[in-house]
Amino acid sequence: MSEFVVIAGLSGAGRSQAANVLEDLGWFVIDNLPPALIDKVAELVQTPGSRIERVALVVGSKAEIDEVTEGLASLRATAERVRVLFLEAADEVLIRRYEDTRRRHPLADGDGVAATIAREREVLEPVKAEADVVVDTGMFNVHELRDRLVELFGEESHAAGMATTVMSFGYKHGLPIDVDIVLDCRFLPNPHWVEELRPRTGLDADVRAYVLGQTEASVFLDRLDHLLDLLMPAYVKEGKSYLTIALGCTGGRHRSVAIAEEVAINLRRRGFDPRVQHRDVNK
């Protein structure tokens, strides 16, 4: 079975780093591939007798976007499995990286780094729309990014079915960008205002009991359960490779953590094996 990952994204967001990680994982990596050659590479890989099964293609920002989207469409039509990874980061993160490395932005034309990044974001929107997963590299240090990519593309990451993640987060720390469904838990009473619960988290039994003991929490989980009964089989049928369900509260330490753990339990009951990530629980 031939398997392809196309790595795209903003300059400075970590395409080369992602390529190195996949190479370490045993993928055959081609960096800065001209989009016009995507078909040729796919043809060679899928030729009978080829020993190459897992190919990562890194597409640079200088590529013609129409050629990239056409190449992706052709690849999806002919290859057995294709995933598109789009790497993202906030403007201030990208600007700081360019200042630290003193490298010139590949699309720079005298407008300044911030204006160039804005222009690149706009140009890459059609490619981002094709992505199976968007990773905000500004949220990770180098080791955390590697761990995230290993989870997504390691040998055991997709032995079967759709890779599902349940994430908790705090709105005051910003919305996560690499998610599919966002649900707000701030309608529930906040354990932060209960003195003995404030220093604890939704992973502690007493906080969890407080959150799940609310009538509104029970109704919310019941209705979400019915919604997931509809959505999960539909996503699988559609062939979705990744699904991330994010639950947020103010700080990401109490309500969203407890609810996320409960949602993960409900998904396991349906036969899924979700990864649970509490983004802001230690902040």
Image (cartoon, rainbow, N blue to C red):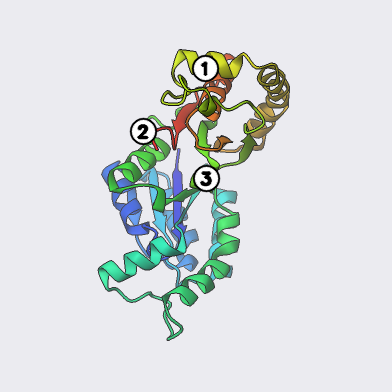
Q: Residue furthest bottom?
A: 110
Picture mark count: 3
Q: Quadrant of the C terminus?
A: top left
The answer to whether the residues at label 3 and label 2 have Cβ atoms under 8 Å apart is no
Name the amino acid type tagged 2.
Answer: Glu
State the residue position of label 2: 155
For numbered disc 1, what is the local secondary structure? helix
Q: Position of residue 236 (x, y in %)?
A: 63, 31
Please tell me which residue lies in front, 154 or 196. Answer: 196
**Label 3 vs label 2: CA separation?**
36 Å
User: Which residue is rendered at x = 50% and y = 35% of the image?
Assistant: 252
In this image, 225 relative to 41: left or right? right
Q: Position of residue 32 (x, y in %)?
A: 38, 65
Residue 37 in view, yes or no: yes
Asked if residue 281 is positioned above or below residue 58 in the image, the reply reads above
First along the sequence among labels 2 and 1? 2
**Residue 89 is drawn in which quadrant?**
bottom left
First along the sequence among labels 1 and 3? 3
**Label 1 vs label 3: CA separation?**
21 Å
Q: Residues within 10 Å of mark 2 (few under 14, many from 20)?
A: few
Q: Which mark is residue 208?
A: 1
**Label 2 vs label 1: CA separation?**
34 Å
Name the amino acid type tagged 1.
Answer: Arg
First along the sequence among labels 3 and 2? 2
State the residue position of label 3: 172
Question: Depth-wise, is mark 3 or mark 2 nearer the camera?
Answer: 3
Please tell me which residue lies in front, 196 or 106. Answer: 196
In this image, 30 relative to 273: left or right? left
For numbered disc 3, what is the local secondary structure? helix
